[in-house]
Amino acid sequence: QVQLVESGGGLVQPGGSLRLSCGASGSIASINGMGWYRQAPGKERELVAAITNGGSTMYVDSVKGRFTISRDNAKNMVYLETNSLKSEDTAVYYCYARIKSLPFGRVDVYWGRGTQVTVPS
């Protein structure tokens, strides 16, 4: 059984910062790509940032220069440092990870339950 659990969301004023964390646990053989999506009310889920196990990163244009994704492979953790937050960043943020699980080596994408980030206008 593999689980992803996020933390770090909350209410923050415009211009503020939050650090989102996500940890993977369970019967894990290896983790490849990890990242964060978000879904705002009435909108589709969008990819915010992703990072490979080698450390290559990508960001959606709207967060470039403000958000930073990182990971700790030894701890099976991925982080999203969010700075200069705007009201349009308000959303539920979901982490995901592409994981090879034990004992059979099956590869699946796992999701966390989400953490709410609210930036009032």
Image (tube, helix red, strand yellow):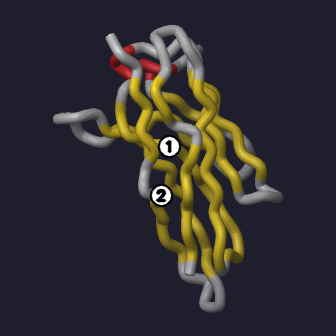
Residue that label 1 marks: 36
Q: In front of the other: label 2 or label 1?
A: 2
Relative to 44, is 26 on the left or the right?
right
Quarter holding the C terminus is: top left
| Alpha carbons under labels 2 and 1: distance apart | 10 Å
Name the amino acid type tagged 2: Gly
Please tell me in which quadrant of the rendered image residue 82 appears.
top right
Quarter holding the N terminus is: bottom right
Name the amino acid type tagged 1: Trp
The label number, if any, that marks residue 112 in the structure image: 2
From what the image shows, is residue 107 above or below residue 4?
Answer: below
Q: How many marks?
A: 2
In terms of secondary structure, where does tag 2 sit? loop
From what the image shows, is residue 54 above or below residue 105?
Answer: above
Q: Seen from this angle, which residue lies furthest bottom?
A: 103
Relative to 106, is 27 on the left or the right?
right
Q: Residue at x 28, y 34 (%)?
A: 40
Asked whether 12 or 43 is in front, the reply is 12
Q: Residue at x 36, y 26 (%)?
A: 90
Asked whether 5 or 48 is in front, the reply is 5
